[in-house]
Image (cartoon, grey):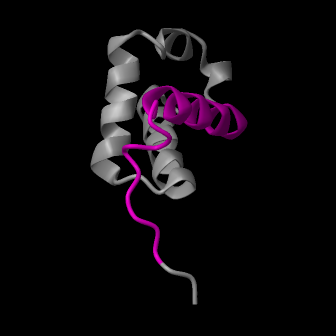
Amino acid sequence: MTYEEYLDEVTTLIVEKYGVTEKAAIKIVVDAQDKEYFVAHDDNRAMRTIDRAHDDARTLFKASAPAGGAAAAPKRPRK
């Protein structure tokens, strides 16, 4: 996948797996870009896999939520 597709995938996974808002997930990914977290991904297409996107989503979410998920949106009640 392209670099942009990879960033979209990581963002989507953060929303889906951790229940944060789309806005918060975008901020997490943009902040990681600003800190050059994705430089190697841009240079090496082999790093842009679905498995790696899951790992990166988990890593970035944990790093961004020092208060145990402060960016998390309320979960919907299960039926």
Position of the N terminus by quadrant: top right
Asked whether 72 falls inside the magenta stretch, the response is yes
Q: Is residue 68 magenta?
A: yes
Where residue 52 appears, x then y in whole percent?
67, 31
Answer with the quarter of the image where residue 46 lies.
Answer: top right
Q: Is residue 7 above or below residue 73?
A: above
The part of the chain drawn in magenta is 49-76
User: Residue 3, position in %: x, y?
Assistant: 46, 27
Q: Residue at x 59, y 28 (%)?
A: 59
Residue 27 can be seen in this image: yes
Q: Nearer the viewer, residue 54 or 72?
A: 72
Whether residue 49 can be seen here: no
User: Residue 63, how many percent across, how many down?
Assistant: 50, 26
Q: Nearer the viewer, residue 7 or 56?
A: 56
> Residue at image x 51%, y 39%?
10
Q: At x 30% / y 34%, what residue is drawn?
A: 27
User: Is 13 placed above or below 67 here?
Assistant: below
Name the image quarter holding the C terminus.
bottom right
Say left or right for 45 vs 34.
right
Residue occupying the far front of the picture:
67
Q: Which residue of the protein is positioned furthest toward the right in this rendering?
A: 51
Residue 67 position in % (x across, y down)? 44, 36
> Total marks drawn?
0
Report the residue at 44% width, 42% height from top: 11
